Every structure is written in structure tokens, then in C-alpha cells.
């Protein structure tokens, strides 16, 4: 009778202890419900364990970017010609420089006018209108110079060269005919480009590699944050604030992992 009474008391105490532990866990959940803590050391180790996958993904993305650049993208070639703008004779050097600079700005507008572009289209028998041709042309003037640079971009390097050269010649003739100034002198003729300006193979491969690295690393980090399992007994005290009193052997057929409340920072 006495032993039976002791067992009942022990059972009540045990249930009370378990109840208190559950209450402590519940209180922890309520107090830390909005907190997501990250252990940087564990995060680093998680990334380190998957370093092979990160490198493989980086290589695959870099290779894919290279193949797409090489075989799926159309290369664009550019050709340039330079003209030197001369002003009227018989004026001072300073005035000559100022007037030459202003004339250069005027000529830059003339280059892309409809009559000039249509003349180039007729000369080369191009299958495009003047608006389409205008989109291929870039006109620049280096600071404090009387140099006008005409650049034409096209998928065909030979065509880009021919358009640039004819455009420079037509512009020079138009200026001489329409304006009371000396025609610009072509100081650098158009050339045929050996390599495309875009797309850049090296640049795209680098972008692909960086993108692959970031995506794989991000996937590992997300997996780490979403994994809320306890893997070892130290995690119980670390994540739940509860001391481990004993460790029971794993029974065959049962899972080794137990859900934890929150991950530590």
C-alpha cells in the first residue's frame, strides 16, 4: 500500500515536471514568435558543405551564357570616320576656334538630316528608310575640338564601313553646297571592324558565373532558414533554453530529427 502511494506521488511529480517543461517551451514560442535568428557560423558551414554544388552551378551558368552569346546573339560591328571642320579664313585664331566649334555642332545635325540619309540610301541601294538608317548612326564631337566623328553600327561589318564612308562624303559635299564655309576634310576614312562591339563574350560569361553563384548560394541560405529541425543535443539548450537531463538511445525505425522552435541568430 505504501509503495503504491509512493508511485502515485512520483507519477504526479513527473507529470508536473513535464507540464512545466511544456509550459516553458510554449512561453518561449510566444516570446520569440516574431524573431528569426541566424547563426552566421552555421550558415557559413552550410555554404561550405555545398561548395561543390555552388561551383558546378557557377560553371554551368557561365557556360550557358557563353553558348548563348556565341550562337544565339547577333553580333554588331561598328565603323567610324572623322572629319575636320574648317571655318572662314581671315579671322583671328580665337574666333576661328570658337566658330569652328559651333560649326561642328551644326554639322552634327546635318549628318542625320533626311536629304543626306536618303542620298546615302540611294548611293548604296540600301533596303531601309532614312529613319532606320538614322538609328544606326552616332555623331560625336570630342570636347574643345573641331573633329566630328561619325560611327555606324550594323550586323554586317562591310556594310557598316560602306555606310560610314559614304555618309562622311555626302555630309562634306552637302556642307560645301548649302553653307558659305569650307567643306569638312575627311581625316580618317571608314574601316572594316575585325571584332564585334557587342555582345561581349567575356562580359556575358562573367555575368552568367556571378548569377549562377548568387542563385545557388541564395537557395542554400533559404534551405538553411527553412530547416527547423534539431540535429544534436546541444541544439536543445541553444535553441530552447532547456538543459538536457538524459539521452535515450535511438529506437530502430524512428526518426532521428525532432522539430525545434526557432533557429538561433
Image (cartoon, rainbow, N blue to C red):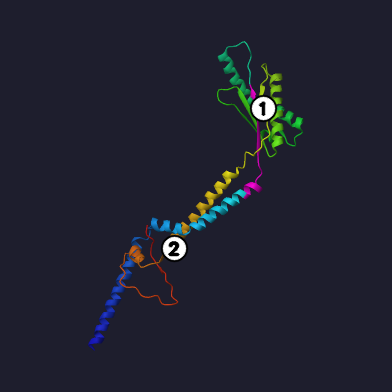
Work out whether 36 lies above or below 140: below
Query: Measuring 63% from the left and 49% from the top, which residue is drawn there?
Result: 68
Q: Which residue is mark 2?
A: 227
Q: Is residue 114 visible?
A: no
Where residue 214 is drawn, which disc sits there? none
In the displayed structure image, the side of residue 48 where residue 135 appears, left or right: right
Q: Is residue 72 magenta?
A: yes
Where's residue 205, x and y in %? Answer: 57, 47
Work out whether 244 lies above or below 102: below
Residue closest to the eye, 150 or 259:
150
Mark sitting earlier along the chain (1/2):
1
Query: Measuring 71% from the left and 27% from the top, which residue is drawn there?
Result: 116
Where's residue 176, x and y in %? Answer: 70, 19
Quadrant placement of the C terminus: bottom left
Work out whether 71 lies above or below 93: below
Query: Measuring 27% from the left and 83% from the top, which residue is drawn there?
Result: 7
Query: Measuring 39% from the left and 56% from the top, which residue is drawn there?
Result: 41
Where's residue 8, x and y in %? Answer: 27, 83
How many marks can you see?
Answer: 2
In the displayed structure image, the side of residue 236 where residue 174 appears, left or right: right
The residue most toward the bottom is 1
Disc 2 residue crowd, few under 14, some 14–19, many 20+, Cα 10 Å:
few
Where's residue 206, x and y in %? Answer: 55, 46
Q: Are marks 1 and 2 in contact (CB under 8 Å)?
A: no
Circle 1 SS class: helix
Q: Which residues are magenta?
A: 67-84
Q: Quadrant of residue 25?
A: bottom left
Q: Quadrant of residue 32?
A: bottom left
In the displayed structure image, the side of residue 111 where residue 234 appears, left or right: left
Where residue 111 is drawn, which disc sits there? 1
Q: Is residue 4 visible?
A: yes
In the displayed structure image, the side of residue 43 where residue 135 appears, left or right: right
Amino acid at each position: 500500500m505504501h509503495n503504491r502511494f509512493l508511485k502515485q506521488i512520483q507519477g504526479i511529480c513527473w507529470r508536473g515536471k513535464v507540464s512545466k517543461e511544456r509550459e516553458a517551451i510554449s512561453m518561449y514560442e510566444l516570446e520569440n514568435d516574431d524573431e528569426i535568428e541566424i547563426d552566421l557560423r552555421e550558415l557559413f558551414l552550410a555554404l561550405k558543405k555545398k561548395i561543390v554544388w555552388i561551383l558546378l552551378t557557377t560553371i554551368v551558368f557561365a557556360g550557358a551564357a557563353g553558348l548563348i552569346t556565341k550562337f544565339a546573339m547577333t553580333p554588331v560591328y561598328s565603323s567610324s570616320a572623322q572629319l575636320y571642320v574648317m571655318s572662314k579664313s581671315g579671322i583671328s585664331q580665337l574666333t576661328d576656334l570658337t566658330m569652328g566649334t559651333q560649326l561642328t555642332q551644326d554639322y552634327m545635325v546635318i549628318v542625320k538630316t533626311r536629304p543626306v540619309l536618303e542620298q546615302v540610301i540611294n548611293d548604296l541601294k540600301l533596303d531601309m528608310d532614312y529613319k532606320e538608317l538614322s538609328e544606326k548612326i552616332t555623331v560625336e564631337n570630342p570636347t574643345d575640338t573641331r573633329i566630328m566623328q561619325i560611327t555606324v553600327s550594323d550586323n554586317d561589318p562591310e556594310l557598316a564601313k560602306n555606310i560610314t564612308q559614304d555618309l562622311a562624303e555626302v555630309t562634306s559635299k552637302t556642307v560645301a553646297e548649302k553653307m558659305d564655309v569650307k567643306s569638312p576634310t575627311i581625316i580618317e576614312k571608314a574601316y572594316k571592324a575585325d571584332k564585334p562591339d557587342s555582345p561581349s563574350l567575356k562580359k556575358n560569361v562573367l555575368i552568367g558565373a556571378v548569377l549562377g553563384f548568387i542563385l545557388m548560394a541564395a537557395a542554400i541560405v533559404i534551405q538553411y532558414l527553412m530547416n527547423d529541425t534539431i540535429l544534436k543535443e546541444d541544439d536543445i539548450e541553444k535553441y530552447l533554453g532547456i538543459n538536457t537531463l538524459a539521452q535515450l538511445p535511438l529506437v530502430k525505425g524512428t526518426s532521428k530529427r525532432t522539430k525545434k522552435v526557432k533557429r538561433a541568430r
